[in-house]
Amino acid sequence: MEEYSYFDENPKKGWGFIGAFAALMLFTIMGLGIDVDEYLQHDFLNIPRGYFYIIFSIDALMMLSLVLMLFYRKIGIFTFPALLILHFFMHSYYLSTFLYTDVTNLFLFTGFGMLAIIPKWKFFK
């Protein structure tokens, strides 16, 4: 009987990898858009300016983590979900908002891991 391997032996990025990366980046940019909208209304909502230095830094690091994943770097795989959860909890704690973009992004990351990261794990450095 022939043995079948689910793990791809080719380091080339397929459409699934690129599509999952694009979806993650789209929802990360949507989260950034929510942060920009809150910044524009910070006087009305009574949000301190210091909060935005932190949240925009987290947004930038999340995008950097995604780019690192695109270039097969393991540090991006570990930092992205940690930053995403930190982003979610900061919104929950400081603004009492539940961001569906962060929750959706977390589920997309889980799917991305199953479909694209795990089969190509040996190519990540």
Image: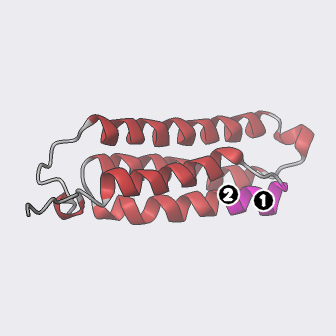
Q: Is residue 86 left or right of residue 24?
A: right
Picture quarter with the C terminus: bottom left
> How far across and down, in percent of the image, does residue 22 sit?
42, 35
Q: Amino acid at mark 2?
A: Phe
The front one of 48 and 71 is 71
Element on which disc 1 rests: helix
Q: Is residue 2 left or right of residue 92?
A: left
> How far across and down, in percent of the image, does residue 79 sit?
44, 63
Q: Residues within 10 Å of mark 1 (few under 14, many from 20)?
A: few
The front one of 98 and 107 is 107
Residue furthest left as drawn: 2
Q: Quadrant of residue 90?
A: bottom right
The front one of 48 and 26 is 26
Picture quarter with the N terminus: bottom left
Element on which disc 2 rests: helix
Asked if residue 53 is among those painted magenta in the image, a careful observer would answer no
Q: Which residue corresponds to the image point at 50% horizontal and 47% vertical from the top-left?
A: 60
* Residue named by callout 1: 92
Circles 1 and 2 in contact, beta carbons < 8 Å: yes
Q: Amino acid at mark 1?
A: Ser
Vertical comparison of 116 with 124: above or below: above
* Residue named by callout 2: 88
Per the model, the C-alpha gap separating discs 1 and 2 is: 6 Å
Most common SS among magenta residues? helix
Numbered label attached to residue 52: none
The magenta stretch is 89-96
Q: Residues within 10 Å of mark 2 (few under 14, many from 20)?
A: many
> How far across and down, in percent of the image, does residue 111 sit?
45, 52
